[in-house]
Image (cartoon, grey):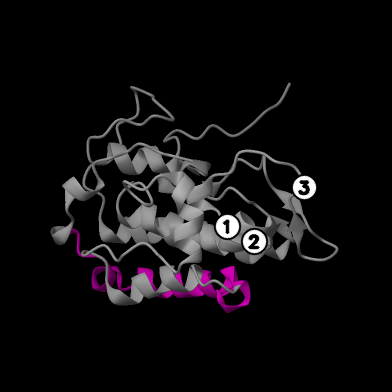
Amino acid sequence: MVLIEYIPCGDLLGYLRKSRGLNDTYYNNPDIKPETNLTSEQLMKFAWQVADGMSHLSSKKIIHRDLAARNVLVGEGEKCKVTDFGMARNVEQDDIYTRKSRGRLPVKWTAYEALLYRVYTTQSDVWSYGVLLYEIFTVGGSPYPDTNARLIADKIQEGYRMPKPRHVDNKLYEIMMKCWEEEPSNRPTFEKLRKTMKDMERNHKMYVNLSQYDTKLYANITDQE
């Protein structure tokens, strides 16, 4: 027997999407009615809580390797909890993990060096966190919309990064871009991200203007790995 905590609101991706009337392809509980029209403050809180959880994981030398909104659960009081450690690795010895086997990868969330060279560090998770920020602040939008997953590695190698959503402030977008730096050491640490997102949460209206949110741009909810 395994006893685990009951998380009433399901996964973050579904929670975001259902808040604007879309179907959740991951979790369905007819008794749970998600809050509609999430505020910029709630979105910033989600971002901070995930950074807080990942800061703890990185301090324990654990690489998640599959950080995405679908792998964050939303509990009581909209508390976000990082979950699904099926791909996680403990790297206590040398802070690096090299994938030997050929398996399916969540390409749109996988870091440059992991896609090209199969090398993972905590800073690879930081890249994924940048993609998760995109998911949060597009209220469940799909990363690299209308882009075939097979082309993403080449596009990233050529320097392509997802463009700034028009309702997102430049400073918030700059954090995403820092997470997507080609050189892992140039990316912020999760501890720095935790502090930054907490500070930004206090001034949430400066960074996300949902009155400019374009629902049509983020209507496609198909996930391509």
Q: Residues within 10 Å of mark 1 (few under 14, many from 20)?
A: some
On the image, numbered disc 2 is attached to which residue? 56
Residue at left offset 50%, top offset 52%? 109
| SS label for mark 2 | helix
Alpha carbon distance from label 3 to label 1: 27 Å
Q: Which mark is residue 53?
A: 1
On the image, numbered disc 3 is attached to which residue? 100
Q: Earlier in the sequence, mark 2 or mark 3?
A: 2
Relative horizontal placement of residue 22, taking residue 77 as reference (left or right)? left
Kindly indicate whether the residue at mark 1 contacts the one at mark 3 (C-beta within 8 angstroms): no
Alpha carbon distance from label 2 to label 3: 27 Å
Q: Position of residue 17 (x, y in %)?
A: 31, 40
Residue at left offset 61%, top offset 38%? 104
Residue at left offset 52%, top offset 43%? 71
Q: In front: mark 2 or mark 3?
A: 3
Quarter-wise, where is residue 111 in the image? bottom right
Kindly indicate whether the residue at mark 1 contacts the one at mark 2 (C-beta within 8 angstroms): yes
Say which quadrant the N terminus sits in: top right
Q: Is residue 207 magenta?
A: yes
Q: Earlier in the sequence, mark 3 or mark 1?
A: 1
| SS label for mark 1 | helix
Magenta region, residue range: 184-210
